[in-house]
Image: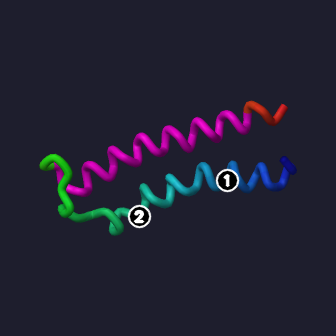
Amino acid sequence: MHSKTRYIILGLLVLIPSFVNLGVPIYNRESPELFGLPFFYWFQTLWLVACTGFYLAYSRLVENKS
């Protein structure tokens, strides 16, 4: 993989979760509910798991750089 492409992918892997988590108006609502939890809470929990995947992929790409 080219160096420039690698840096673009690394940047996206960090920026995508950051923008979603900072975009509170996107998910600041109560419906739809999931198992009685308002959307705000279960969306945050889902993104916690998704962000772990993003950062795991980021660390694997940085690790393979050398």
In the rendered structure, which segment of residues is drawn in magenta? 37-62
Give the side of residue 46 with respect to residue 14, left or right: left
**Residue nearest the viewer, comparing 24 with 9:** 9
* Element on which disc 1 rests: helix
Q: Position of residue 4 (x, y in %)?
A: 83, 55
Instruction: Assess disc 1: are there few (<14), some (14-19) or many (≥20) residues with their C-alpha within 10 Å of its C-alpha.
Output: few
Q: At x 18% / y 56%, what residue is drawn?
A: 33
The total number of labels drawn is 2
Q: Who comes first in sequence, dot 2 or dot 1?
A: 1
Q: At x 74% / y 31%, what residue is drawn?
A: 63
Relative height, residue 61 to residue 40 (above, below):
above
**Contact (Cβ within 8 Å) of mark 2 with mark 1:** no
Q: Amino acid at mark 2?
A: Gly
Q: Amino acid at mark 1?
A: Gly
Relative height, residue 15 to residue 61 (above, below):
below
Instruction: Assess disc 2: are there few (<14), some (14-19) or many (≥20) residues with their C-alpha within 10 Å of its C-alpha.
Output: few
Q: At x 62% / y 39%, what residue is drawn?
A: 57
Task: From the image, give the main secondary structure of the stretch colored magenta.
Answer: helix
Snapshot quadrant of residue 66: top right
Q: Position of residue 51 (x, y in %)?
A: 48, 44
CA distance for labels 2 and 1? 18 Å
Q: Name the residue carrying label 2.
A: 23
Q: Is residue 54 magenta?
A: yes
Q: Name the residue carrying label 1.
A: 11
